[in-house]
Image (cartoon, rainbow, N blue to C red):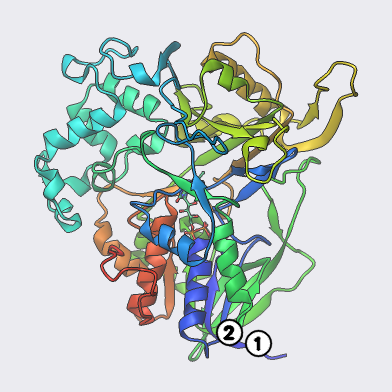
Amino acid sequence: MPPRVLDVAVVGAGISGVYTAWRLNEERPDWNVALFEYSDRIGGRLYTRTLPGMPHVHAELGGMRYNPVDHRLVANLVEFLDLTSRVFLMGNPNPAPGDPSGKPVGAANNLYYLRRKHIRLRDLNRPGEIPYAVSWIERGLDPDQLQEHVVKYLVPGHAKLTPDEWFRVKVFGRELYKHGFWDLLSRVLSNEAYDFMKDAGGYDANVANANAVSQLPVGEYGPEVPFLTLKDGFQKLPETIAERFETAARASIHRNHRLASIEKRHGFYRLRFRLTHEVTVNNWSAASARQVHDRADEEPVDFNAKQIILAMPRRSLELVEWDGWREPRVRDLRESVLNQAAFKLFLGYEYPWWRALGLHAGRSITDLPIRQVYYFGTEGEYDGADPANHSSLLMASYNDIGTVPFWKATENDDAFEGYRTPFVPGWAPPVYLGRQPATTGMVELAQNQLRELHGQATLPAPYTALYHDWTDDPYGGGWHEWKAGVRYDQVMPEIRKPVPDDEVYICGEAYSNNQGWVEGALQTAEKLLEDHFQLRRPSWLPPDYDLSW
Ligand SMILES: Cc1cc2nc3c(=O)[nH]c(=O)nc-3n(C[C@H](O)[C@H](O)[C@H](O)COP(=O)(O)OP(=O)(O)OC[C@H]3O[C@@H](n4cnc5c(N)ncnc54)[C@H](O)[C@@H]3O)c2cc1C
């Protein structure tokens, strides 16, 4: 059978890919548009799982929340698609799910355990509380306030600057974008204050040595920010879009197709795909890592297309053979971002032991390798669940960059054999749930650190566990940050069509102005469609919404 000639081949079924394919199909219904995906799963870095015994509580291995004020593209899309959102509990001022009183849950008790000292969130900016020898001017400032202090000191009048003007700001004799953020902080803060910002901020990425323009104006989101998530999990967003796309005429989705190479022919491109399948590694179910390998027993499959959209991050692009990469300018564009490692570990317990310690929502933070711990509710508190079910979810670790290798070393340990103990002694024997996708080493190390963080000699044992490390191929990291020295206001439009004579386009979070957020992935996709495919702005997105560069 001769290979088909597609009008557009969209490669990568993360949020930017499904969105692009769907919008193209809606606006150009006479075009043949096909979407290709490496794994058998739609969603990419939106990956919602549930743990045994908690079918209504979502363990979000990738993206988990959006801020409806800043993330208008996501919020409007969610509304347009008629998806149900719900509050993502960060603490104040959100009521607990299912609590008819609507009483705010509160995060003031949440813990900071730094340099072996316990501090509550409410005391974080009390002078003398933190175990860091900061200078007198830095005393009493929490990480957000330190950031504010730096920005006010270096860029007076910063609130009035337009995004373009940030690239013209000069500090210490050169443009701000030429500074690495860490380098810059080292000039204005004591190293102790830098360490405090890094440790107490929760994310290494917030103070990484990335482009100072992208780092300086942003603050971390405190407990007062009203985050939302989707009732059926964040992955429901790309899945819903994919369903709409797949049912349309002239649209198709090809799962388990890894794009291996692109070759230019006369008037079209030949895309060569390797067929993939899931593989169990080390004799234990590595379901969370979803090891997807090429099928050695299958011949590659070719498709022809007039135009190609690569909706994927930097590492994924590097794994695709294409002549376009030979040009150093194009390689430089691709390498203009840093891959930032990210890792999450979820533990399921029979009851929410943290509530007895005054911890209800939001996160606790430590300099131990678990870094951030998020408290979620019990199964019974979610809509439609059995109210008597107290199984509870803890994000026992959310960590990035420096601490990810700590967990890597335990990946090949024995599988964690979670089990349920009977609630009433003698009522029933423990029920083994079988091998769970995390290892004994991982769970043991996490439990040790949870004990230390919460100041408890013992803690109940988790009955189930799940983890995901985003450094594995084809992602190369959880998110991206612009490198110092990069004029990313200029790189962004260039990389969307990196070779002027080629009909090969790139979109997604990695090369966006909202890195680490779904909003950024969608902005680049919509911008690509409007600028290069002349699509009209959709009815649900206001004309004044700024898609950035
Ligand atoms: C731990 C973590 C926490 C996060 N938290 C949040 C959050 O709370 N809120 C938020 O808004 N965002 C969050 N993000 C970011 C958000 O998840 C991403 O910005 C977004 O999902 C990226 O979408 P994308 O389409 O750009 O790329 P991806 O989702 O990475 O999609 C790329 C797709 O391409 C596929 N692919 C790769 N190579 C090939 C190939 N050769 N052939 C075929 N297919 C290929 C991949 O399998 C994947 O499906 C988080 C991310 C992580 C990792």
Quarter of the N terminus within the rendering: bottom right
Residue 365, disc = none
Q: Is residue 220 above or below residue 236?
A: above
User: Horizontally, is 389 left or right of 253 in the view?
Assistant: right
Q: Earlier in the sequence, mark 1 or mark 2?
A: 1
Residue 110: x %, y % from top left = 45, 22
Q: Is residue 216 left or right of residue 322?
A: left
- Residue 358's place in the image compared with 54, above or below, is above
The residue labelled by disc 2 is 304
Secondary structure of residue under mark 1: loop
Q: Residue at (22%, 16%) from the top-left corner?
A: 139
Percent across and percent down for residue 507 are: 42, 66
Nearest the eye: 146 or 108: 108
Q: Note whether residue 441 is visible.
A: yes
**Can you tell which quarter of the image residue 383 is in?**
top right
Q: Quadrant of the C terminus?
A: bottom left
Residue beneath disc 1: 3
Name the amino acid, label 2. Answer: Asn
Q: Is residue 237 above or below residue 227?
A: below
Instruction: Measure how far apart labels 1 and 2 are at the Cα level.
Output: 6 Å
Near mark 2 (Cα within 10 A), the count class, few <14, some 14-19 or many ≥20, is many
The CB of the residue at mark 2 lies under 8 Å from ligand 1: no
Is disc 2 placed on a helix, strand or loop? strand
- Image location of residue 356, percent across then percent down: 58, 17
Query: Horizontally, is 123 left or right of 49 in the view?
Result: left
Q: Residues within 10 Å of mark 1 (few under 14, many from 20)?
A: few
Q: Is residue 412 at all visible to an observer of this figure? A: no
What kind of residue is marked 1? Pro
**Label pair 1/2, CB-CB below 8 angstroms:** yes
